[in-house]
Image: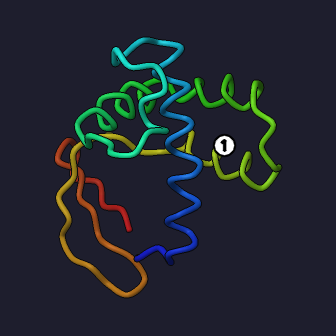
Amino acid sequence: MKLSNEDAKLFYELFFPLLDYVNREYHILPEEDYFGQGMIDPQDAAEVAHFLWERTWIIDDYLERSDLPEEHMEILKSWKGCITGRFIIERHWKKGSVFISIDDNSVFL
């Protein structure tokens, strides 16, 4: 599945402030408002995101302090259902990509 330009823009508008919040609260990287500034190091984003995905309850804390529209809050709440791990992309189809878990061979679309 490929996000439309509009959906991709919304994803980053929601994701980077969340990463900034996580970084400010838990001091993963030395910079404070790192992800709101121009160039973003993907390794830094991955480090903060990895911390977040192991503690998805942080999203609730973030939402309590935010004044986002309800639609955006619902999107962020849905991210708490993420599945983490290492995966192999088996193939791409029009309706999605097939991922196979390296850990237990579970298959996801």
Vertical placement of 49 versus 2: above or below?
above
Q: Secondary structure at mark 1?
A: helix
Of residues 12 and 57, the one drawn nearer to the viewer in this rendering:
12
> Looking at the picture, which amino acid does disc 1 mark?
Lys
Residue 100 picture quarter = bottom left
- Within 10 angstroms of label 1, few (less than 14), some, or many (20 or more) residues? some
Counting from the top left corner in percent of width and height, residue 54 is at 41, 26
Q: In this view, which residue lies farthest toward the front?
A: 38
Q: Position of residue 85 (x, y in %)?
A: 28, 41
Q: Quadrant of the C terminus?
A: bottom left
Expressed as whole percent of the image width and height from the top left, the position of residue 16 reads 50, 42
Q: Is residue 80 above or below residue 89?
A: above
Q: Residue at x 34, y 14 (%)?
A: 30
Residue 59, located in which quarter of the rendered image? top right
Q: Which residue is mark 1?
A: 77
Q: Is residue 88 above or below residue 67?
A: below
Identify which residue is drawn at 35% across, 41% down.
Answer: 84
Quick one: 3 or 30, which is closer to the camera? 30
Residue at the extreme bottom of the image, as rendered: 94
- Check the picture and name the quadrant holding the N terminus: bottom left
Image position, residue 42 (x, y; %): 26, 43
Q: How is the image coloured?
A: rainbow
> Compared with residue 31, is residue 69 higher up or lower down, i.e. above or below?
below
Count of numbered marks: 1
Q: Residue at x 38, y 76 (%)?
A: 96
